[in-house]
Image (cartoon, grey):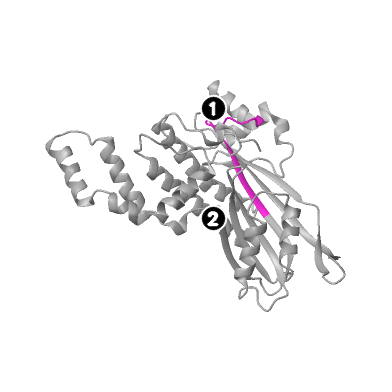
């Protein structure tokens, strides 16, 4: 994918960032509700999806605090194929927190800062300078944000034993933030294991997933890579959720859905808060096996089904109506009718 300046765009004002953060927070929380109501995931998968979504929301909130009163720098957003922050923003968070103690040593003492604020507000009757507000937000950022809750480029979930009557022995999950799309992906793998115990051998399995499944690729290729690198694993079913893009007033992509929303906003037929979010679920299932390798090093591999692709769109009722009127063919390939979400109501920018 070709990288453009819009993959790391800066919004026009701090007010727009306030608007943007409220939208992303609202949409992700509504998305969880929509997935649950339409039963697109099992209860266990939904629980995992919520956990990864919480990491994503926590990270974006940390970015909001980090840049709140920073006049020199702003959060970079991918407006082309994502709607989410550029992947480097997550790396910056992680790097900041690696150096937390060094930054804390340079920050103003909170007691001194409080006294300055009280003196400015109560005695001088003046507004607090933005430079001082930036100092306060920096203190909050470096003292309250925890590295373990950051949505890193690759986040590994636990290995759990399958239920007694299942056709698999174990299930695990992982997520990654793809650097070419600037979008989060969440994956699930149901598998058997020829070793003694998959949970005891978890580090070896985790390393295989990190090396083989840490970026967007054809799902059957991902399944083959995992199967080849760790012969003890027998994957039975792999599912991957592609979260996004977010279609909204800030987007500058080529999607028909985005352009219909932007035109509706420009014509004042829909509000500035209008949005839709796309979501795709890909799945593959194992079937027969085959032998691969030389005479002395043959390995039994899984044969995989064709990738099952299911596309979904979530949007408020008014936006769904608009899309059916303006770009009905853009909705033809959805696995279900567009799924209704609540309207977003926030102060205008």
193 to the left or right of 3: right
Task: Depth check: give the residue in front, 24 or 13.
Answer: 13
Q: Picture coordinates of residue 305 (x, y %)? A: 81, 56
Q: How many numbered discs sit on the rendered protein?
A: 2
Residue at left 43%, top 32%? Answer: 16
Q: Secondary structure at mark 1?
A: loop
Residue 42 shows in the view: no
Q: Does residue 105 lie above or below 191 as drawn?
A: above
In the rendered image, the quadrant that contains the N terminus is top right
Q: Does residue 138 lie above or below 19 as drawn?
A: below
Residue on which disc 1 sits? 270
Q: Does residue 291 lie above or below 248 as drawn?
A: below
In the rendered image, the quadrant that contains the C terminus is top left
Q: Which residues are magenta?
A: 240-256
Asked whether 241 falls inside the magenta stretch, the response is yes
Q: Picture coordinates of residue 252 (x, y %)? A: 58, 30
Q: CA distance from mark 2 to mark 1?
A: 31 Å
Q: Residue furthest right?
A: 295
Say few, some or many: other residues with alpha carbon within 10 Å of mark 1 (under 14 / 14 to 19 / 20 or more): some
Asked whether 25 falls inside the magenta stretch, the response is no
Say few, some or many: other residues with alpha carbon within 10 Å of mark 2 (under 14 / 14 to 19 / 20 or more): many
Task: Check residue 52 in the rendering and tell me which mark sits there, or answer none.
Answer: 2
215 to the left or right of 13: right
The numbered mark, 2 or 1, whose residue comes first in the sequence reads 2
Task: Depth check: give the residue in front, 176 or 298.
Answer: 298
Residue at left 68%, top 79%? Answer: 196
Q: Does residue 235 lie above or below 309 as drawn?
A: below
């Amino acid at each position: 994918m070709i990288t453009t300046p819009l993959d790391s765009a800066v919004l026009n004002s701090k007010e727009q960032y306030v608007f943007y953060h409220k939208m992303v927070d609202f949409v992700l929380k509504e998305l969880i509700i929509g997935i649950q109501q339409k039963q697109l995931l099992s209860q266990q998968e939904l629980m995992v999806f919520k956990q990864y979504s919480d990491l994503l929301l926590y990270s974006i909130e940390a970015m909001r605090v980090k840049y709140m009163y920073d006049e020199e720098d702003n959060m970079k957003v991918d407006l082309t194929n994502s709607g989410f922050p550029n992947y480097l923003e997550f790396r910056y968070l992680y790097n900041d927190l690696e150096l937390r103690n060094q930054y804390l040593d340079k920050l103003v003492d909170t007691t001194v800062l409080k006294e300055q604020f009280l003196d400015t507000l109560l005695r001088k009757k003046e507004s607090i300078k933005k430079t001082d507000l930036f100092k306060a937000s920096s203190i909050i950022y470096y003292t309250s944000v925890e590295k373990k809750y950051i949505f890193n480029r690759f986040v590994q979930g636990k290995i759990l034993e399958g239920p007694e009557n299942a056709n698999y022995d174990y299930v695990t999950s992982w997520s990654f933030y793809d650097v070419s799309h600037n979008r989060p992906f969440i994956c699930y793998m149901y598998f058997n294991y020829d070793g003694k115990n998959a949970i005891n051998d978890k580090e070896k399995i985790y390393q295989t997933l990190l090396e083989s499944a840490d970026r967007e690729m054809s799902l059957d290729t991902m399944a083959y890579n995992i199967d080849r690198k760790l012969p003890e694993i027998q994957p039975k079913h792999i599912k991957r959720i592609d979260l996004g893009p977010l279609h909204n007033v800030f987007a500058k992509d080529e999607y028909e859905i985005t352009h219909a929303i932007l035109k509706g906003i420009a014509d004042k037929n829909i509000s500035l808060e209008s949005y839709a979010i796309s979501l795709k679920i890909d799945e593959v299932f194992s079937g027969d096996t085959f032998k691969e390798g030389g005479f002395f090093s043959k390995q039994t591999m899984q044969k995989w089904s064709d990738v099952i692709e299911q596309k979904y769109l979530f949007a408020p009722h008014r936006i769904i109506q608009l899309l059916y009127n303006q770009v009905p063919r853009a909705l033809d390939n959805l696995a279900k009718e567009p799924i209704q979400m609540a309207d977003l109501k926030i102060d205008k920018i």
